[in-house]
Amino acid sequence: MKIDILTTFPEMLVPVIESSIARIAAEKGIVYIEPHDIRSFSENKHGKTDDYPFGGGDGMVMTPQPLFSGIRHCLDKEKPEKPRIIFPTPDGVPFSQDLAEDLALEP
């Protein structure tokens, strides 16, 4: 299984991957995890990935272009027959043990 993770902090994932059950799975050839820096897919010369909310309010929102370009890069690189894209959102389905078990059964 190949897992590509798009993040603005890929260097933070490396210690987690190397010191968890994911490391054991990788050593056994069960999974290959590759973090990608979303900034590298930004069309902005500064690698900007966020912007102010256009509707007003506090905080920042992620701009879609780097995410879509990153997803396209991963799909074009591997060309999976039936890719599974998991895109966490604040109003999405919570990740649970049951969901993890269901995902583990997928080819």
Image: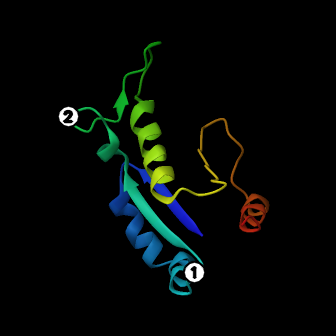
Is residue 42 left or right of 89 when viewed as pictured?
left
- In depth, the one of 23 and 74 nearer the eye is 74
Tell which residue pokes out farthest to the top in this image.
Answer: 55
Q: Position of residue 14 (x, y in %)?
A: 39, 69
Labels 1 and 2: the sequence-earlier one: 1
SS for callout 1: helix
Quarter of the image that includes the N terminus: bottom right
Residue at image mark 2: 45
Q: In this view, does 106 lie to the left or right of 72?
A: right
Q: Which quarter of the picture shows residue 22?
A: bottom right
Q: What residue type is labelled 1?
A: Ala
- Residue displayed at 72% across by 44% down: 93
Residue 96 visible here: yes
Cα separation between marks 1 and 2: 37 Å
For disc 2, the neighbor class at 10 Å (few under 14, some 14 to 19, many from 20) is few
User: Where is the C terminus found, in terms of image quarters?
Assistant: bottom right
Picture layout, residue 81 above or below residue 40: below
Question: Image point 48% across, 46% down: which residue?
Answer: 71
Mark number displayed over residue 25: 1
Left or right of 40? Residue 74 is right
**Disc on res. 39:** none
Q: How crowded is mark 1: few (under 14 residues within 10 Å), some or many (20 or more)?
A: some
Across and down, in percent, residue 43 comes to: 29, 33
SS under mark 2: loop
- Viewer-side residue, 78 vs 106: 78
Q: Is residue 62 visible?
A: no
Quarter of the image where one finds residue 58: top left
Q: Position of residue 48 (x, y in %)?
A: 29, 35
Q: In terms of depth relative to the viewer, which is nearer, 102 or 75? A: 75
Amino acid type, callout 2: Lys
Above or below 75: residue 97 = below
